[in-house]
Amino acid sequence: MQMGKKKVLFACTYHGARSRIAEEFAKRSAPGRIEAYSACFESGKIGPLPIAVMQEVGIDLPAKPPKPVFERHKERDVFDYVISLCHAATTEQCPIFKTNVDALYAKKAERISWSVPDLKSLSGTEEERRAGAREIRDKIKSEVISFLARIGIDAEIA
C-alpha cells in the first residue's frame, strides 16, 4: 500500500537561498516520493553566489525568492514537516524567525531545526566566500539526505 507523499517545507531567514537549496536537493534525492517547498522570511532576489555553487553540482537555482513563510501560512498550506535552516550565531533574526515558524506550523507539522550558516555571513576574497558557500551547500545536502533516511526515503543521489 502506497502512503501519500510527505510534504516538507524548508524555511530560512532572509531571501531563501538555503531553503531553496534544500528544496532542490530533496526533489532530486526523492523524485516523486516527497513534496518539497521552500519559504523565506524576507522577499528579495537570491544572490549570485548560491546560484553559482549550485550550478557546480548541475542544479539551476532560480534567483526568484520562495514565498514568505507568512504568505504560505495565509494560503493555509499544510506540511508534515517544517525544517528551519537558521544559524543563531550569525543572525539576530534566528530566534524571532524560529518562534514565528513554530507559531505558524507547530500544531500541524513536525518541527525540525538545522543550524546552517547564512550565505550572507561569508567574508573574505571571492574564492574564500565561494569555498564557504560550497561548505554550506554540502551541509544542506547532507542534512537533506539524513532527513530523508529518517523518514524512510532512500536518497537517489550520492
Image: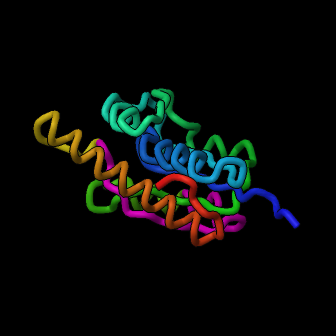
Question: Seen from this angle, which residue lies furthest right?
Answer: 1
Q: Quadrant of the N terminus?
A: bottom right
Q: Nearer the viewer, residue 59 or 51?
A: 59
Residue 12 placement (x, y as % from top left): 46, 50
Residue 96 in the image, given as x and y percentages of width and height? 44, 58
Q: Quadrant of residue 116?
A: bottom left
**67 horizontally vs 61: left or right:** right
Where does residue 37 sit, x and y in percent of width and height? 61, 46
Q: Is residue 56 above or below residue 93?
A: above
Question: Between residues 8 and 141, which one lies in front from this camera angle?
Answer: 141
Residue at x-position 43% and y-position 40% = 17
Q: Which residues are magenta?
A: 101-119
Residue in view at x 43 percent, y 63 percent? 114
Whether residue 157 is in magenta: the answer is no
Is residue 113 rendered magenta in the image?
yes
Q: Quadrant of residue 57?
A: top left
Residue visible at 21% across and 44% down?
A: 131
